[in-house]
Amino acid sequence: MFRSFLRKFEPRFSLSDADRDALEQANVHGRFVGPRTDIVSEGDVPDHLHIIRSGLACRCKFLPDGTRVILAFLIPGDVCDLNVPVIGALDHSIATLTLCEVARVPHDVLGRLTASYPSLDHVLRCAALVDEAILREWLLVVGHRPADRRLAHVFCEFLVRFQSVGLATANRYELPLTQVDLSDALGLSPVHVNRTLGSLKRRRLVTLEGKQVAIPVVEALKDFAMFDPAYLHLAPEANAPRVA
Amino acid sequence: MFRSFLRKFEPRFSLSDADRDALEQANVHGRFVGPRTDIVSEGDVPDHLHIIRSGLACRCKFLPDGTRVILAFLIPGDVCDLNVPVIGALDHSIATLTLCEVARVPHDVLGRLTASYPSLDHVLRCAALVDEAILREWLLVVGHRPADRRLAHVFCEFLVRFQSVGLATANRYELPLTQVDLSDALGLSPVHVNRTLGSLKRRRLVTLEGKQVAIPVVEALKDFAMFDPAYLHLAPEANAPRVA
DNA sequence: CGTCGATTTGAAATCTATCAACGATGGTGG
DNA sequence: CCACCATCGTTGATAGATTTCAAATCGACG
């Protein structure tokens, strides 16, 4: 059930069968959420932990003038709201971009689980810290780099993150995002996203066919984006498609 | 010893005397760090927890071309590296901007402390989550707003954060930052920071005399910056200077 | 067929960076 | 005390990046 989540971390942490069974049994309230719908809303005090099982979601805020700002993309295997109970309420919304399957574990059940299975607790905390590291990298990229490198960086990040959960080949994946979604995430106008995408295509750094993203020469794109996957804290072999 | 840290959180959490004593005794290795010096460097596996006691520091990364990017400002009372042991190594540096007094608690000692004093554990975790919330707000501001509003927002944030540790009056504080520091934090060129500061001064949104920042009409600046202190997760009364 | 959302394109206005130079300031050594 | 140096702040001119406004195109879908 939590295949994506487990796959992402098993290269680094060996969960025991007991850990795995515990997670399986806890997911008593899984559900589907339609596109462009809140999974958890700003101000909520969620009593469940949510994990994206399929589809694409995001952390976002809405400004008084109605503008949406996307703070992070959430892909299958990502944990949404692990630490929210500690601080009280969520200070941003978590919303789907596409249709998503969302696993739900009641926080009180989770508390008993992590107490009984320390390695599970560790893996979850680790996931939350990687999330924070991604946030820092975005601040760096979105705040300090020109539009073409921002886009290139996002394409690199999606490649590596999708690979870590088995959703990308060595240089190709499906990205069901709209240009407006990208503009809300990168702090650019939709028009400029469009032009910049065109520029990347002309330079043969990426290929876009519908929702399919292909990267002709991965190293070229990574160099252009100055992308160093270290911040994702993945196991070394997770950067390349797994062979065994 | 941890006055700033305690002051920041006591409006919300009542630490017992035992908690407080425990913290006091743990700080066996406090020290001063000169300006522009790493407290912890990228890649380090720190065996101590660091807390800023006085001075101004930052989280930062250095790009291959030597550019410095400031990801966060750390003020007295801020915790630097609580969760680093969970994930292994620090993926960014923590460096002083001015002369700083830094408290140090060995992580193994800290582990015993938090096990014995749950409210202390909770306060520390909460501080880490507020840090993350600040990071999200910065991503929003730095990535999606023009230069003048970025600067205005930083001035508002410093006002409220400094107030929460007793380092600001209702509308005034000392900010020992250089315009280059601001530019590295906000993703602007130093020249543009200078011009934009001039523009804010001409509009009487802020007053700068040396390192003294004064805000003639706090509400005006907050409105201009679209600043909502909710993300700082402070106690309600901490937004205004405390009276009792 | 008509509509809606998404993408694309053009032209002009605005914002920001870069380059270069100058001024102020404070510390340091002769 | 003064000359020198380094750092920071300021200003002007110019080029480049990005936004805005407006309109055209395209595709999916009822």
Image: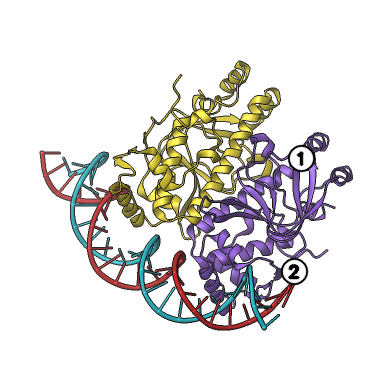
Chain colours: A purple, B yellow, C cyan, D red
Secondary structure at badge 1 equals helix
Amino acid type at image mark 2: Thr
* Chain letter of the residue carrying label 1: A
Q: Quadrant of residue A237?
A: bottom right
The single residue placed furthest to the top in the displayed view is B17
| Chain under callout 2 | A
Q: Is residue A219 above or below residue A232?
A: below
Query: In the picture provided, is A104 more to the left or to the right than A83?
Result: right
Q: Where's residue A122, x and y in %?
A: 74, 41
Crowding at mark 1 (Cα within 10 Å: few <14, some 14-19, many 20+)? some
Say which label, 2 or 1, has the lower sequence index.
1
In the rendered view, does B237 fall on the left or right side of B193?
Answer: right
What amino acid does circle 1 point to?
Answer: Asp
Work out how far the residue at label 2 is from the one at label 1, CA to CA, in angstroms.
Answer: 30 Å
Q: Residues within 10 Å of mark 2 (few under 14, many from 20)?
A: some
| Residue position marked by numbered label 2 in the rendering | A169
Name the spot of residue A170 as percent of width and height, x first: 72, 69
Do badges 2 and 1 share one subunit? Answer: yes
Q: Residue at x 56, y 72 (%)?
A: A197
Q: Which residue is mark 1?
A: A121
Report the front residue among A16 and D11: D11
Identified at 50% across, 23% down, the residue is B1
**Residue at image coords 67%, 23%:** B117
Instruction: Tell me: B85 left or right of B71.
Output: right
